[in-house]
Image: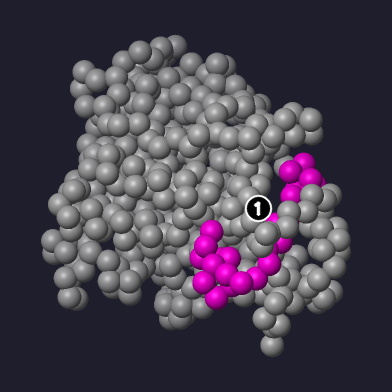
C-alpha cells in the first residue's frame, strides 16, 4: 500500500491536472530537468524550448507543491530528492523499462496507470485480445459508443459514422490563405526568456531555428487554445483538413497536438467541447466528426497500438528500404529543395517544428517511401524534429501508416501518389519548376516519376493487393517506363 504522503514524480509529458489533480491533488510534486536527456538526441530547438518551458511553468503553477530538480540524469535527481516517489506509466517502452528498474531499486514506490488518454491500456487489451486484424474504423466506433460521443442511442448522430468524404476539399481558388482567424498563440514570459538563455548556454546540437513559442504548454493556455479553435476555426476545419497552402501553414487545424502530448489538455475535454459546438449549432457535423475522429479515433489508436505491437515494431522494414535520409533532409535545408511542396514542408519543420498531417503523410512521408529511406531513421527524425513527436507517437505513424514498413499490419496499402494529388490538394504546383503531369525530362515531377519507380520496385507485392494492383497494371502500360526508371535511379535533385 502506497503511503498517502508519497510525492508524485511527473515526466514532461504528464503535466496536466489529470495526472497531478483529483486524488493526487494533496501530494508534493517532483519535476526533473535531466541534461543528459536533452543531449541524447538531435532535437529541434523549439521542441526543447517547449519541454523546458512546460516543466518550469508547471513548477510555477503548482507553487509550494512542486520541486524542480536540475541534474545530469533522472536517477541523479531521484537520489538528490531522497524520498521514494509515485509515477504514472511513462509513454515509451524505454522509459517504462527504466521506471520499473527504479522501482526495484526503491527509488519509485509504485507505478500507476496513465490517466492522460481516454481509454486505459487494460481496456484496450480487452478490446484487442480476440482480434487478428485491426481496423481504425472498428476502434473508432468502439470509442464513440464507449464514451457516448456524437451518438443518438445506439446509432451515430446523422446516421453516419464517418464524414471523411466530405472533408477532402482542395484549397479555395484565387486565395493565398484560407482566411480563417489566426490560431491562439501564447504570450512568452520571463520563463520563456530564461529557457532561451539556458538553451543558448548549453550549446546543444539541435536542428531547426529558434522562434517564438507557438504552442500551449500549460493547462490554462491549452484551455484558451481549445476555446479559440472551437469558436473560430473548427467550422472550417473539416472541409479543408487535407488541403495545403503555401502561405497558410496552420490552415484551420487546431494546433492542439503539443498540449495533448504534454498532458496539459485531456483528449476528452477537447472532444466534449467539439461535440458541444455541434449541439449548439456552432459547427457543422462533418467538421466536428473529423476533429473527434483525429483525437478519439486516430490518436488513441496510435497510442494503444504502440504498446500492443511492442518495441520490436520500430525495427520493421518489410519493403527493404535501406537508403539513409539525405543531409538536406536531416539538416532541414529547405533551400536545397526545388520542388515547392517538399520545400514548404521542410521549411515548416525548420521554422516551426510542425506541419499538418497531409504534409507529413503525402509529401514528406510519400517522398521518403518513394526513395526508400530507412524507416527506423525516419521514425527517429520525425520524433526529434517535430515539436509534437514524442516517442510513442511516431512508430505506428511512420512505420505503419507512412512507410508501410510493417507489411500491412496497420494500413491496407502504401500511402503515396504522383504529383496529380499534390496539384489537386495544394497551391504549390503552379509556381514549381517541376510539372506534375510529366514523368520524364528535366521538369519531370519527382513525385510523379518517383511514384512509378516505387510501383515498379514493389510490383509483385502491390499486384497481390486488391487496392494497389491497378497501379501495377497502369505501370505496365507505360511506354517510357525504362527511361523513367533510369532517370529516377540517377536523380539527386528534388
Q: Residue furthest bottom?
A: 1
Q: Position of residue 471 (x, y in %)?
A: 33, 41
Q: Is residue 134 left or right of residue 181?
A: right
**Residue 446 is one of the magenta-drawn residues:** no
> Residue, x 54% and y 21% (percent of image)?
334
Q: Residues within 10 Å of mark 1 (few under 14, many from 20)?
A: some
Mark count: 1
Determine if residue 130 is in view.
yes
Q: Is residue 350 above or below residue 283?
A: above
Q: Position of residue 451 (x, y in %)?
A: 41, 33
Q: Camera-side residue: 463 or 362?
A: 362
> Residue, x 18% and y 48% (percent of image)?
282
> Residue, x 71% and y 75% (percent of image)?
6
**Residue 32 is one of the magenta-drawn residues:** yes
Give the extent of the magenta segment.
16-40
In which quadrant is the N terminus drawn? Answer: bottom right
> Residue, x 17% and y 75% (percent of image)?
153
In which quadrant of the rendered view does residue 13 lie?
bottom right
Q: Position of residue 356 (x, y in %)?
A: 42, 38
Residue hosting label 1: 59
Q: Is residue 344 above or below residue 205?
A: above
Q: Camera-side residue: 492 or 310?
A: 310
Q: Is residue 397 left or right of residue 49?
A: left
Determine if residue 374 is in view.
no
Q: Position of residue 214 (x, y in %)?
A: 50, 35
Q: Is residue 355 left or right of residue 212?
A: left
Q: Is residue 6 above or below residue 49?
A: below
Colour mapping: one colour
In which quadrant of the rendered view does residue 268 lie?
bottom left
Element on which disc 1 rests: helix
Q: Camera-side residue: 153 or 494?
A: 153
Amino acid at each position: 500500500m502506497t503511503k498517502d504522503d508519497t510525492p508524485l514524480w511527473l515526466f514532461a509529458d504528464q503535466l496536466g491536472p489529470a495526472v497531478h489533480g483529483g486524488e493526487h491533488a494533496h501530494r508534493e510534486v517532483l519535476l526533473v530537468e535531466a541534461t543528459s536527456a536533452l543531449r541524447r538526441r538531435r532535437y529541434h530547438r523549439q521542441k526543447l524550448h517547449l519541454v523546458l518551458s512546460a516543466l518550469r511553468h508547471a513548477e510555477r503553477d503548482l507553487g509550494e507543491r512542486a520541486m524542480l530538480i536540475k541534474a545530469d540524469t533522472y536517477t541523479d535527481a531521484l537520489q538528490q530528492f531522497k524520498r521514494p516517489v509515485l509515477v504514472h506509466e511513462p509513454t515509451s517502452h524505454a522509459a517504462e523499462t527504466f521506471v520499473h528498474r527504479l522501482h526495484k531499486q526503491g527509488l519509485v514506490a509504485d507505478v500507476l496507470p496513465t490517466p492522460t488518454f481516454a481509454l486505459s491500456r487494460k481496456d484496450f487489451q480487452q478490446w484487442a485480445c480476440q482480434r487478428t486484424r485491426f481496423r481504425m474504423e472498428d476502434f473508432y466506433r468502439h470509442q464513440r459508443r464507449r464514451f457516448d460521443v456524437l451518438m443518438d442511442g445506439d446509432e451515430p448522430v446523422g446516421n453516419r459514422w464517418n464524414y471523411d468524404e466530405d472533408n477532402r476539399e482542395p484549397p479555395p481558388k484565387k486565395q493565398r490563405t484560407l482566411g480563417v482567424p489566426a490560431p491562439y498563440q501564447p504570450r512568452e514570459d520571463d520563463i520563456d526568456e530564461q529557457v532561451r538563455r539556458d538553451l543558448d548556454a548549453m550549446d546543444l546540437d539541435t536542428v531547426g531555428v529558434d522562434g517564438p513559442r507557438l504552442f500551449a504548454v500549460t493547462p490554462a493556455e491549452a484551455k484558451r487554445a481549445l476555446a479559440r479553435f472551437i469558436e473560430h476555426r473548427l467550422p472550417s476545419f473539416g472541409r479543408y483538413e487535407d488541403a495545403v497552402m503555401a502561405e497558410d501553414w496552420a490552415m484551420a487545424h487546431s494546433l492542439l497536438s503539443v498540449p495533448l502530448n504534454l498532458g496539459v489538455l485531456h483528449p476528452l475535454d477537447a472532444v466534449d467541447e467539439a461535440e458541444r459546438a455541434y449541439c449548439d449549432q456552432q459547427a457543422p457535423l462533418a467538421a466536428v466528426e473529423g476533429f473527434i475522429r483525429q483525437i478519439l479515433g486516430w490518436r488513441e489508436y496510435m497510442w494503444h497500438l504502440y504498446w500492443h505491437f511492442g518495441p520490436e515494431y520500430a525495427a520493421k522494414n518489410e519493403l527493404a528500404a535501406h537508403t539513409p535520409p539525405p543531409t538536406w533532409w536531416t539538416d532541414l535545408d529547405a533551400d536545397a529543395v526545388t520542388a515547392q511542396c517538399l520545400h514548404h514542408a521542410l521549411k515548416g519543420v525548420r521554422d516551426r517544428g510542425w506541419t499538418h498531417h497531409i504534409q507529413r503523410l503525402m509529401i514528406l512521408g510519400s517522398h521518403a517511401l518513394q526513395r526508400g529511406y530507412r524507416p527506423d531513421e525516419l521514425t527517429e527524425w520525425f520524433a526529434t524534429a517535430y515539436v509534437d513527436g514524442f516517442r510513442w507517437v511516431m512508430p505506428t505513424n511512420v512505420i505503419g501508416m507512412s512507410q508501410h514498413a510493417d507489411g500491412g499490419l496497420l494500413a491496407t496499402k502504401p500511402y503515396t501518389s504522383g504529383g496529380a494529388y499534390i496539384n489537386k490538394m495544394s497551391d504549390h504546383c503552379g509556381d514549381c519548376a517541376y510539372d506534375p503531369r510529366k514523368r520524364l525530362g528535366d521538369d519531370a515531377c519527382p513525385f510523379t516519376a518517383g511514384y512509378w519507380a516505387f510501383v515498379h520496385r514493389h510490383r509483385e507485392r502491390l499486384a497481390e493487393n486488391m487496392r494497389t494492383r491497378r497501379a501495377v497494371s497502369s505501370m505496365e502500360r507505360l511506354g517510357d517506363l525504362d527511361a523513367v526508371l533510369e532517370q529516377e535511379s540517377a536523380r539527386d535533385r528534388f
